Amino acid sequence: MKFFILILWISFLINIHCQFITLNGAWRGTINICHKKELFRGCNNNINFSATVPGGIYTDLYRNNIIENNLFGRNDVNNRWVGNQSVVYTKNFNVNSDFLKARKIVLIFYGIDTFSNISLNGHMIGQTSNMFLRYIFDVTDYIKEDQNLLQVAFRSAVKVAEDLYDEQRKNYIVPPVCVPKEYNGQCHVNHIRKMQASFSWDWGPAFPSVGIWRNVELVSVNDLLINDVTTDIRREKDIWNILVTIFLETTQSKKENLSTISCHVASILHVSQNELISNTSEIILDTSEKYININISLTVPADAVENWWPNGYGKQHLYHLTTTVTTANGVLHKRIRVGFRTVELVEELLEKGLSFYFRVNDVPIFAKGSNFIPASVLPELGSKEDTIRHLLLSAKETHMNMLRIWGGGVYESKLFYDLADEYGIMLWQDFMFACAMYPTNDSFLKNVEQEILQNVIRLKNHPSIVLWAGNNENEAALYGNWYGTGSARIYREDYVKLYVNLLKREVERLDPVRPFLVSSPGNGAYEETYNYTGVNPYSNLYGDVHYYNYIRNGWDITQYPRTRFCSEYGFQSWPSIYTIATAVENAKDLHVDSDFVKHRQHLPFGNQYMRLLISHNFVIPQNNDSVRDFASYIYLSQINQAVSIRIQTEAYRQAKSEVNSIGEGMTMGALYWQLNDVWQAPSWSSIDIEGRWKMLHYYAKDFFAPIIVTPHLSISNELSIYIVSDRLYTLTNCTVEIRVYNWKSMTPVFAKSFNDIIIESNKAMRITSFWLDEFLVQVGCGSLESAKRSCIAALFLTDKSGSLIAPVNYIYPDVLKNADIPVANVTMEIEENHSLPGKLSNYPDFKFVLSTDNITLFVWLEMSNIRGRFSENGFHMFERKKEIIFHAHEGTTIELLRSNIRLATLSDIYNARSNFDDDYSVLEKQKIYINCT
Ligand code: BMA
């Protein structure tokens, strides 16, 4: 044991095998600005700018004042010329003679976006064509002592995509030929291996970036370079078997004639401070091979380590594993982090169809969460630590246990996966193919093959990743003829070639432990029986489903599919008016029909759909006061989204343990579309681009709670009450209480309890059913005609000690636009610092005490300029007083809170009492306060 510790020390102290120099930081860039709108004519102007690596052209030009803020106004279109240009990035750097003593010097680009020629001191060293690849170039022959000049010359991705499309069409067209006109986007992104959403999406602008978006390093190598270390961890009875694979690159020096290298390899698992589990091996490497993989096995008694659990099921234990490779010339080491958990995608035969759920450490898990799109439309800004931490913590705090990394974005940063490991967020990892057909010519497939290889190897150590999935909606597109592929065989053949013959086969070879799914939505394992295309992939009896309906009322629970797993569903809303204010040119843009509003809505007919969906439930106010009406509209859009997704998610959770007469149900996953945003625009997100939680995100905390009590109102008005538990233990002596309120009084007109309920572990159970209309009449809500609009009901679930064990839930017997919503006067006091012991953030908490004189719905608190979140928001008040905590995410004072807080209630909106009246000046100031990029 001591020997290994010694080796470890040596490796840290004298890492004589490899040294590295970072080439991050300041670079120079050159771009031709003739295409800038105002300079278009008679211009021949290459200009230099200071650049940053990691970085990208849009960020660099903005920082150099060559273009305006990318996310402001119509700058997505105004700045588009940038994406059509060739750009050259250069870096001068020095190396000393010591560094050059090594046998070999390699230059590593961890991410280049996308098409570049790279030269060092005037010598071409390589080309790039895939932003998802790490490129390693041997520069031994071109690097010199002292001054060096590295140059990366980019071609416009827009132009390359166009060229590749032109080339391809000579044979046949690979559609879609372009995105819908509402996107203001670029065409042919499916021909290039670049973030697909960077040419625009229905929630995002086009920024066809170029740049060096990840780190750059120069590394000196003697005998060997460890490119990667991976683990396959399998459980066998009481033992975890770890197969460590070390991916080595040899130096193959031309000058020397070394055909073999002897090395000592050790892998050490750090079980605790005093306990290591290790294995070693003596190996002779044949250096005529450039790439050599070596394996070493570790056997870990199951009781020596703790399991890694998804959020809500236990802790996320993680362990370090260090691998050292020692040769006569020194020691190389690499440290990775691993977790011990099993994961299965269970697709067992049911009476009809197959099940579809994740079983982790033998526990069936209902997957609760959302879909993750890139944190920024500019790849270089998509891994900012505070943004990623905020998004993933927001997922964890709302009981999410899964995020789907959607296939139109990027394979995320190490930080992202590390945090997901730490927070217990299981990841459904798509490969980056979305909403399109893709080419299958040789060079495309070769490129993709590298992409699979590198990314599976880079990511497979993360216990958070529980599934690889081939593409987003491409099978659905083919089946539904979204892009005019019709019945042409070629597209089906291409589909199988890319996702089955290449992706599936390769991923299963590289990671034999994790499950692989060809497409989402899809019919899971059933697809193999019909070779993956030609059958409706939206079956409720197999696999996963995406469900969207923008016509029917989202509050109508009867419309939702009883699927095995709903991996996408959603409704749009607008972000906070304070977030929008960071993008508008003047207050005129803050109008429901402004050009700005039209410009930012990419979903064809999106604004009409949203209006229709809101108007199912609410009267949309029109006071001829544009800002106030817009603020009210935003507020209603957020309520409508939050309640619709609450009801839909609860429908999926209710169906967890039962099937209907045609075998549909046993739903085991609900991932709503979408967690985050890339700009200030209407979208499906629950967190906006400024990090503000929309009402939906507050609601997620309730509808994803481990135990919920939830109503189901059938078409014939039968009300069923369910309890759904994800807990792995049984609770006895529980009580559900239903309280019915007449709108006019805060004292219930009726209350009834269902006692002695046993809540079974990991189950959904129906507690009771009755006819709602008759019930309301009986309990005193009035006649059969008026009862539904006169009353509202609340559900409480308590344990035997009388404590609430689920969030309070509500039954809206009628659409709220028909209800007799009363006028309520809500006041608010902010109390002294209310930080509780043990809180994680360094910033203070504040207590807000709200009082009302009447029932009031959807009480919405909003901070204009202070970052933070409330303990609850968008809530109903059936009591005179309510206390809410504000968790600040920055230093602040009560005075600042008072001047920044805004309160909205449904009663205020209906009674035209919005307090946005005096806010024009506040909204104007927002522009200065927030830096959009
Ligand atoms: C889904 C996604 C995205 C899209 C979303 C909303 O189908 O896969 O492509 O943004 O719907 O339309």
Image (tube, rainbow, N blue to C red):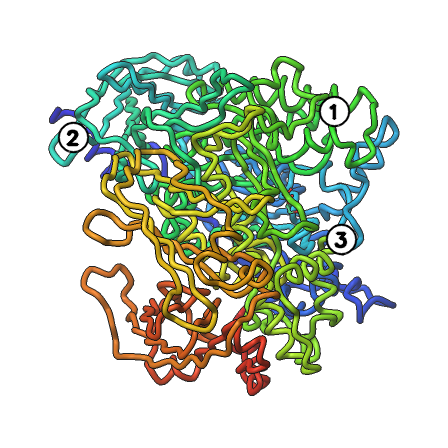
Is label 1 in a helix, a strand or a loop?
A: loop
Q: Residues within 10 Å of mark 2 (few under 14, many from 20)?
A: few
Q: Percent x, y for residue 104?
A: 45, 31
How far apart marks 3 and 2 lie (CA) works out to 62 Å
Q: Amino acid at mark 2?
A: Ile
Is label 2 in a helix, a strand or a loop?
A: helix
Q: Residues within 10 Å of mark 1 (few under 14, many from 20)?
A: few
The residue singled out by tag 1 in the image is 441
How far apart marks 1 and 2 lie (CA) works out to 51 Å
Q: Percent x, y for residue 125?
A: 60, 36
Q: Amino acid at mark 3?
A: Pro
Residue closest to the eye, 476 or 263:
476
How far apart marks 3 and 1 lie (CA) works out to 32 Å
The residue singled out by tag 2 in the image is 5
The residue singled out by tag 3 in the image is 604
Can you say whether 387 is above or below 566 in the image?
A: below
